[in-house]
Every structure is written in C-alpha cells, then in structure tokens.
Image: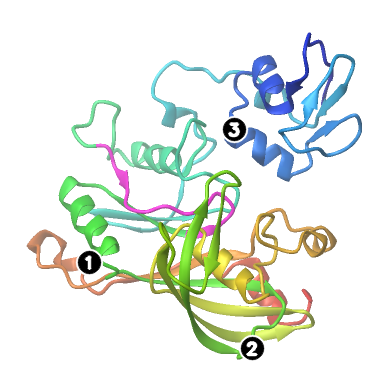
Amino acid sequence: MRILKAKCLVPTRLDKYLAEQFPVLGPGRLNKALRENKIKLNGKKQPLSTRVVAGDEIKLFLLDDQLEEPDRRGPAWKSARCPAEVVYDCPQLIVVNKPAGLPVDGADYDTLLNRTLLYLSQQGEYTADAAYTPALCHRLDTGTSGLVLIAKTAAAEQALVQAIKQREVKKLYLCVTFGRPEPPDAVLDGYEIKDADRGIVKIVPEQQPGAKQVETRYETIAVSGRLALLKVELITGRTHQIRAHMASIGCPILGDSKYGNNAANRELRLKYQALCAWELTLPRFSQPELSALSGKVFRAPKPWYYAQILDGTLK
C-alpha cells in the first residue's frame, strides 16, 4: 500500500494527479483499481474526476510492481503476466478465453492480445520480427469474459472481420440479470444512441439522429431468488448492447457498474459484470485455406455463476 499526501498548487483531478505521480497508471489501470476499491481519497472511494487539494490523503492498495514502469526492453507481449487460455488453435486462427477484468488490447502490457502473442511465442509460432502479427477480429468489454477470435494470417483476418461485420458469426452469451425478465423468452428491439460525455449508450424506442438499430434475443435458463440466468444472442452487435438492452427492461446484468444495480453488486461482491461470450459459430467460408473452419462451433467453459444460479447458491 502507498499513502500520499497531496501537494498541488491548485485543485487537480484525482486521475490526473495519480498519473503524474505514477506514469504507469493509465486510464485503464486507474478505472480497474477504482472498481476494485483500491483507491481511497481521505478514507473514501471517490470518482476519478474528484478534485484533489493540498493536504488530501490518498491511499493506493496496489503492489509496488503495479506502480513501477515495467522493463521496456523488447516487445510489450514479453511482459504479459501469463500466456492466454487457448480454446482452439490452427494455422489460420486461435480462439482464446478472456478472463473478466483483462483488456483485449491497449497501453497496458498485460492484455489479452499480448498474452496470446506470448503463448504463440512459447509455441515457436511467433517472433518479434514476424511478417504478420496476429490480430483481434472483434472485441469484448474489459469486464466481460469469454471467447475472442484472433487471426493468425492476413487472409483469415479479412474473412473473419468481414463475416462479423455481415452478422454471419453467431454469438451466444451467458449472463445473470438482477430481476427476472418478463416474458422469460423474447426478442428485444429498439435503437441505441451513444452518450459520449458519460461513456454510456441508451436504448430508445424510436429512430433518432445518430441512433442505430439493435436487436437482442434472450432465453431464461433458470431463476434463483431475485436473479435470472439467461442465454442471449446478439443479432446486431453494438457497443454495450446486451448490458444496455437488458437494463432498459429493468433487468440489468449483475455486477455491471454502468447500467446495473450497484447496491446489489456490492451486496453480492461482484467486481465485474456476470456476462460471458460463451459460444461462437462460424459461417461457411469460400476460401479453400479456411474450409476447415466452416461451421465450426467454439464454446468457453461455463462461468462460475452458471452453477451457482442452478443450485440456488447465488440469489
């Protein structure tokens, strides 16, 4: 733990002050630390936008190696914490299982992409001077767990990105909602509009300038007390779509700090949203080199909360 006594001539945002003291603490790391209650200003959890004044006490419940610059010699992926968890691997594609809380990419050294490159390096498939660097074909929110497709060739990247764009890759998620949706199974529609100032999206019933159509199908698998376990299909694929759509009907994802019930999240001690990209089904590919991937179905291990809803432990 580090304890700081603020020394600033004028009131300064908490995130800016901490970034000046510890350059390694970028926006992603600061937001993660705040979510995990590892930043306290004068003994309380405060938004990163809070102004710090001289004499304020800041406590950081972080290890020393989290506050120091990593060894920057060599490529970033060599500093990833561990290799990625691999679900499927072939010459064209690697499918990895992302844990909740890990960013897919970004300024941090420990990202899903860097963990994947570390894995491929250990397998003798990738070096820092390789002609092609494996690339993400899509993304997941940092707090969401589950399957991510990473192309290992330029041809695979082009085909997979195009298939996702054309909604040819079927995506099924598992999640827990705070509240039981009625009816138990349904297709939700509407329009999604971004609120850039607040970093969220809103679901509205009618078309508006800048709004994009959204469609989400859900099926209730089981219920436990106030909670419901759902299987959700993304028909469209918009920013925060499942999180915002389920919240719009009064059944937010458990653990979701942006759209959810924070009192319930604290009570049940969830750091991240109970949302997992569980199953991906690929379409038929016309390219001969991708024929082995045609119709492939990939599944992640069921998340921990799946069994706890079924047996009533989580409720």
- Dividing the image into 4 quarters, which one contains the C terminus? bottom right
Q: Position of residue 238 (x, y in %)?
A: 43, 61
Label 1 amino acid? Answer: Leu
Camera-side residue of 81 and 113: 113
Q: Position of residue 265 (x, y in %)?
A: 77, 61
Residue positioned 67% across, 76% down in the render: 307
**Residue that label 1 marks:** 293
Image depth: mark 2 or mark 3 in front: 2
Precedes in sequence: disc 1 or disc 3: 3
Image depth: mark 1 or mark 3 in front: 3
Precedes in sequence: disc 2 or disc 3: 3
The reply to whether dot 2 and dot 3 touch (C-beta < 8 Å) is no
Q: CA distance from mark 2 to mark 3?
A: 38 Å
Q: Secondary structure at mark 3?
A: helix
Q: Residues within 10 Å of mark 1 (few under 14, many from 20)?
A: some
- Please give left or right for residue 297 compared with residue 277 in the image: left
**Residue that label 3 marks:** 27
Residue positioned 80% across, 32% down in the render: 61
Quadrant position of residue 230: bottom right
Q: How is the image coloured?
A: rainbow
Q: Secondary structure at mark 2?
A: loop
Quadrant position of residue 5: top right
Label 3 amino acid? Answer: Pro
Camera-side residue of 110 and 36: 36
Residue positioned 75% across, 30% down in the render: 62
**Residue that label 2 marks:** 182
Camera-side residue of 132 and 127: 132
